Image (spheres, helix red, strand yellow):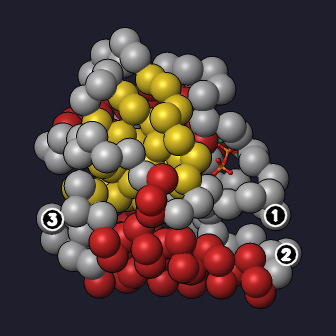
């Protein structure tokens, strides 16, 4: 997809701030520092619309990026950062529930994992949380450039098995460095918008 317009519309902390123009939404979830911002920026071809390596501990928000006046990418706060207080973690949980349980314009979730490593228990919890809401999930296994070609298949299998990915959910190997997987990612996303 050619992105001609991408803008942040709101960083929301509560549902009353969500946009009300009823455009379809694609959520983006992932462990802190997994490469979520790099994924968004690569897809929309902006150097830094989504802030990379945003510091955990700062205000957690749902960032609504309007793309081509056609749909929203909704960047949800990263999970799995060890040094987060209990209060922060609880706030995060409430924010996620409020959004994923109620949002009827939400069509699918892109979940970013690191192709180098076994999915963490937090990744598994996140995937199950999304499937609990019967949401289609597109797994983007990023940092593909860090895995040698000969080992790709092994790492893909590891992600498949680690998350117990359901039939119907796509797994797309991706690199924000090389752009590999970008077209496949767009193809998968386009089905839902
Ligand atoms: P976020 O916290 O999930 O938004 O993660 P970032 O997008 O800020 O990425 C975290 C770190 O991983 C940064 O240093 C990025 O440059 C790096 N990174 C992200 N994607 C890739 C990738 O595909 N390949 C490589 N080699 N590094 C990446």
Q: Nearer the viewer, mark 3 or mark 2?
A: 2
Callout 3: helix, strand or loop? loop
- 3 and 1 marks in contact (CB < 8 Å): no
Callout 1: helix, strand or loop? loop
Instruction: Count neighbours of disc 1 (C-alpha within 10 A) and say few if under 14, some if 14 to 19, many if 20 or more.
Output: few
Count of numbered circles in the view = 3
Quadrant containing ligand 1: top right
Q: Nearer the viewer, mark 1 or mark 2?
A: 1
Please give the residue where the numbered disc 1 appears in the rendered image: 57
Of residues 133 and 190, the one nearer the viewer is 133
Callout 2: helix, strand or loop? loop
Residue at figure coordinates x 18%, y 41% from the top left = 193
**Percent x, y for residue 64?**
47, 43
Q: Nearer the viewer, mark 3 or mark 1?
A: 1
Residue at figure coordinates x 53%, y 71% from the top left = 95
Image position of 118 with respect to 26: above or below: below
Image position of 18 with respect to 21: above or below: below
Please give the residue where the numbered disc 3 appears in the rendered image: 168
**Percent x, y for residue 148?**
56, 45
In this rendering, does residue 137 appear at all? no
Instruction: Count neighbours of disc 2 (C-alpha within 10 A) and say few if under 14, some if 14 to 19, many if 20 or more.
Output: few
Q: Distance from label 3 to label 2 (Cα)?
A: 35 Å
Image position of 135 with respect to 109: above or below: below
Please give the residue where the numbered disc 2 appears in the rendered image: 83
């Amino acid at each position: 997809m050619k992105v001609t317009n991408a803008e942040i519309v709101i960083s929301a902390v509560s549902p009353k701030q969500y946009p009300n123009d009823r455009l379809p939404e694609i959520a983006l979830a992932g462990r802190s520092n997994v490469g979520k911002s790099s994924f968004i920026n690569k897809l929309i071809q902006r150097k830094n619309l989504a802030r990379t390596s945003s510091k955990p501990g700062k205000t957690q928000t749902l960032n609504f990026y309007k793309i081509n006046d056609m749909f929203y990418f909704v960047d949800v706060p990263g999970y799995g950062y060890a040094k987060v207080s209990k209060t922060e973690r609880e706030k995060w949980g409430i924010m996620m529930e409020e959004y994923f349980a109620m949002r009827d314009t939400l069509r699918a979730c892109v979940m970013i994992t690191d192709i180098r490593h076994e999915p963490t228990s937090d990744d598994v919890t996140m995937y199950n949380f999304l499937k609990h809401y019967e949401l289609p999930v597109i797994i983007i296994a990023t940092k593909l450039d860090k895995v040698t070609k000969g080992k790709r298949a092994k790492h893909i299998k590891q992600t498949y098995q680690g998350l117990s990915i359901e039939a119907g959910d796509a797994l797309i190997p991706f690199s924000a460095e090389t752009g590999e997987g970008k077209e496949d990612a767009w193809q998968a996303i386009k089905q839902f918008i």
